[in-house]
Image (spheres, rainbow, N blue to C red):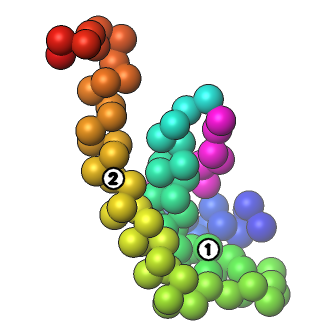
Amino acid sequence: MRYLLQKYVKEDTVKELSLILDRRTRWNSLLAMIERFHKLKVCIDKALIDIGCDTKFIDLEWSKIKDLIESLQPFKLDLEPLCRRDSTLLK
């Protein structure tokens, strides 16, 4: 699956992008994972077809993923400054 996915990613984006795994140690890795997954949706659908997988994502599911991304992005914008090393209570 990975080889097929990278083949379509290279064709679509002209560079190698892999899926991101969520990490317990980073609060925002979930958002990064979902954003990358959504960005590669066409490539993922093509790779699933190539391997003969019965799993297919319908437009409603892709729409829900997009809604989730849009819901989490404001939190990322607000929390990133608080997570910087030079951040203090006054800032």
Residue 73 horizontal/vertical position (percent): 33, 53
In the rendered structure, which amino acid carries the disc numbered 2? Gln
Disc number placed over residue 44 in the picture, else none: 1
Label 1 or label 2, whichever lies nearer to me, is 2
Q: Position of residue 37 (x, y in %)?
A: 54, 63
Answer whether residue 89 is magenta in the image.
no
Left or right: residue 30 compared with residue 80: right
Give, as a three-letter code, the residue at label 1: Ile
In the rendered image of this protein, does residue 87 appear above or below residue 65?
above
* Label 1 residue SS: helix
The CA distance from mark 1 to mark 2 is 23 Å
Q: Residue furthest front?
A: 89
Q: Which secondary structure class fits the magenta region best?
A: loop
> 45 left or right of 60?
right
| Nearest to N terminus: mark 1 or mark 2 | 1
Circle 2 sits in a helix, a strand or a loop, which is it?
helix
Query: What range is drawn magenta here?
Result: 15-24
Crowd class of label 2 (few under 14; some 14 to 19; many from 20; radius 10 Å):
some
Q: Quadrant of the C terminus?
A: top left
Which residue is painted at 55% across and 32% down in the image? 26
In this rendering, the count of numbered labels is: 2
Per the image, the residue denoted by label 2 is 73
